[in-house]
Image (cartoon, rainbow, N blue to C red):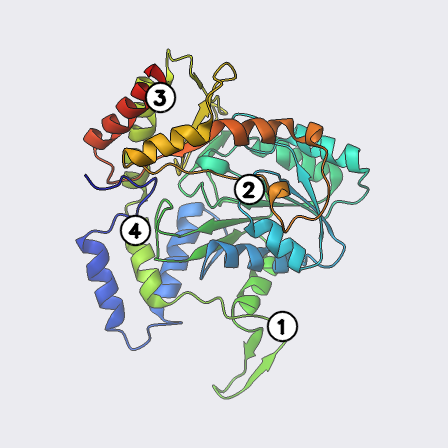
Amino acid sequence: MKFIPYGKQSINSKDLLLVSKSLKQELITTGNFVNNFENKLRKYFSSKYAISCTSGTAALHIALKSIDIKKNDIVIMPAINFISSYNLCSNLGAKIFLADVDKLTGQMTPETVMKCIKINKLKKVKLIITMYLGGYPENIIKFYNLKRKIKCYLLEDACHALGGSYRFRNNNYKIGSCKHSDISIFSLHPLKSITSGEGGVVSTNNKNFFLKAKLFRSHGIVRGKNHWEYDVVLNGLNYRLSDINCSLAMSQLSRINTFIKKRKQIYQHYIKNLIKKNNNFNFIHYDKNSSSGFHLFLLSLSSQNRLNKKNLMKFLFKNKILSQFHYIPIYKFSVFKEKVNLNNFQGAEFYFKKTISLPIYFDLSKKNQNYVINRIKFYFKK
């Protein structure tokens, strides 16, 4: 039996055909496939602007530069998060403050942000970075109201939530519409909803942010009337995504609803056959007005369960099932130099001690889903 990974891309013949077509074009970078993909993204999100780039981290860097995050700007982000946000804001010289998270969803809440502001006596917050861990977009309207109240920018790290949506006042909004945020970023890594191989996306309705993003993505260059004439107006980088990558992503985007539907079915199968009526696990309640991208299935061990999650992961590994941590709290890394009071991070501590990610991806067969479920049941029965 082969290992069952926790995530995996799904490539079909249509993907291969379009990638092959892109390779036959005169331009395989800065060509028509890039423009076509970005136009399809704008239409999918119902946003005014969307640009592609080389990774989710690149998208985040572009977004931070568009908002003009600089030295000593105050940024609040969740304690449970992939390290990109912390590294980038640190490299830009920002003052970073970590907010606690809900112990089951692992997501920062408006209440934990306000607690962070109060504990650290923050006067002027420049940016709040939300992160939709696992794929469910939580507390969007509450964060939007908080952003307006304290007059800061709101950046949605939606790398897990491509394909997700939410409902507000009888209207449905795609994550990436930026109706209740300033800017959104996404990843097109092979484990995400759709892939370009490696890639990322920035979405916004702010024209100024968009223009800055385009400049920063391509060395800060402004072209003149003639092809040999150009000026460099800011210190940018090369974060351009090639036509080859965009052709794959464009093909995948055409099937995103199919991808999300299958991930949802797997998610519900786990819930029905593993979580419900099982005291070993917590049932995670999400906002009923939100719809997930189903990037992860988070298995949360209940408080009464004293078993070490690492032992469960070792057992699964021996049975050729790859589970994962998403994520280790940022304050536990060596790169984080500040001392923290763990009493201020009780949600993050519970989440870290109790939660793992189970396999969920488009090509995960029902047979392998049941194998994962039965192995976990056997472990707890034993």
- Gap in angstroms between the C-alphas marked 2 and 1: 28 Å
Which residue: 45% across, 57% down? 55
How dense is the environment of label 3, judged by Cα within 10 Å: few (below 14), some, or many (20 and up)? some
Q: Which residue is mark 4?
A: 252
Q: Which residue is mark 1?
A: 235
Mark 3 lies on residue: 271
User: In x, y percent, where is residue 277?
Assistant: 37, 11
Amino acid identity at mark 2: Asn
Give whichever of 173, 195 is nearer the camera. 195
Residue 363 seen in the figure = yes
Q: Amino acid at mark 4?
A: Gln
Q: Are marks 2 and 4 in contact (CB under 8 Å)?
A: no
Q: Circle 1 sits in a helix, a strand or a loop, which is it?
A: loop
Picture quadrant of residue 78: top right
Residue type beneath disc 1: Asn
Residue drawn where x is 82% and y is 37% of the image: 121
Q: CA distance from mark 3 to mark 4?
A: 27 Å
Residues at marks 3 and 1, CA–CA distance in whole angstroms = 49 Å
Determine whether label 3 and label 2 are within 8 Å by CB.
no
Asked if the residue under mark 1 is in contact with the one under mark 3, i.e. CB atoms within 8 Å, the reply is no
**In which quadrant will I find the C terminus?**
top left
Q: Dots 2 and 1: beta carbons under 8 Å?
A: no
Q: Which callout, 3 or 4, points at the residue further toward the start of the chain?
A: 4
